[in-house]
């Protein structure tokens, strides 16, 4: 990996203003991990190395966000995926946006939230270091979702997000969006 790319990813993480003590702890642990020189990307599925970068990107408007009913996870999640080797997380968002929703050309803002989540499920246990991005769009934006990956794609108003059936950090992400947009 180029030192410039590691520095750019570190800058993306360092620029996130933490919502709370949990996000600050996740941010600091992530900066320490990046600074350690460790491999940042998943090289082999499902979990090699056992800590690696991933992204979520939520299409949002003033009233809510788009979530997908993810087949493998069995949860309502923002779209996203693992960051490919030698890829910046913003480039991963642009790639996944096209692959998962058929949308290209949207500007990708800086990450606004960061989590470290232990994943067990069907895959080998690992830690996803996830940069969360909010992409403002109109609900009328035409989408072509990947039917092999998602059962359904649906807009939820912020007060109706399915927190019990989603990523454990979704409520905190929504709270941070509300704070940023207040």
Image (cartoon, rainbow, N blue to C red):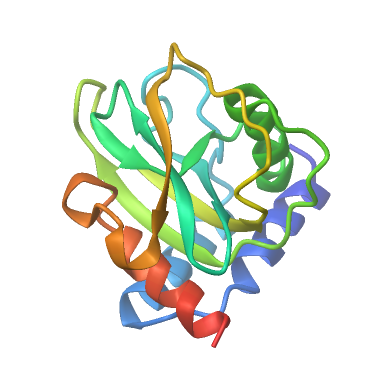
Expressed as whole percent of the image width and height from the top left, the position of residue 15 reads 65, 74
Q: Residue placed at 31% from the left, 74% from the top?
A: 22
Question: Is residue 126 something that shows in the picture?
Answer: no
Q: Residue at x 60, y 29 (%)?
A: 101
Q: How many marks?
A: 0
* Residue lying at the far top of the rendered structure: 148
The answer to whether residue 109 is above or below residue 126 is below
Q: Position of residue 2 (x, y in %)?
A: 79, 41
> Residue 7 lies in what quarter of the image?
bottom right
The quadrant of the rendering that contains the C terminus is: bottom right
Pick the front one: 6 or 18 = 18
Residue 172 located left or right of residue 132: left
| Residue in view at x 37 percent, y 26 percent | 47
Q: In the figure, is residue 20 to the left or right of 107?
A: left
Q: Is residue 136 shown left or right of residue 81?
A: right
Q: In the rendered image of this protein, does residue 22 appear above or below residue 149?
A: below
Asked whether the viewer can see residue 138, the reply is yes
- Within the image, what quadrant is residue 36 found in? bottom right
Query: Does residue 27 sit above or below 71 in this rendering?
Result: below
Seen as rendered, the residue at the extreme bottom is 182
Above/below status of 96 relative to 167: above
Residue lying at 23% horizontally and 29% vertically, measured from the top left: 74
In the image: residue 25, left or right of residue 56: left
| Foreground pick, 44 / 74 | 74
Question: Where residue 72 sits: x, y (%)?
Answer: 29, 21
Quadrant of image for the N terminus: top right
């Amino acid at each position: 990996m180029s030192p410039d790319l590691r520095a750019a990813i570190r800058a993306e993480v360092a620029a996130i203003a933490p919502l709370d003590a949990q996000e600050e702890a996740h941010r600091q642990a992530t900066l320490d991990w990046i600074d350690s020189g460790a491999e940042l990307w998943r090289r082999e599925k499902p979990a090699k190395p056992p800590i690696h970068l991933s992204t979520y990107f939520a299409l949002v408007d003033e009233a809510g966000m788009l979530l997908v009913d993810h087949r493998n996870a069995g949860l309502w999640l923002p779209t996203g995926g693992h960051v490919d080797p030698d890829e910046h997380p913003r480039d991963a968002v642009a790639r996944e946006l096209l692959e998962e929703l058929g949308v290209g050309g949207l500007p990708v803002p800086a990450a606004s939230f960061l989590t470290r989540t232990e994943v067990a499920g069907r895959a080998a246990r690992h830690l996803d270091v996830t940069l969360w991005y909010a992409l403002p769009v109109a609900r009328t934006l035409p989408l072509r979702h990947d039917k092999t990956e998602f059962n359904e794609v649906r807009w939820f108003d912020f007060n109706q997000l399915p927190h019990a059936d989603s990523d454990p950090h979704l409520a905190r992400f929504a709270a941070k969006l509300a704070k940023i947009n207040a």
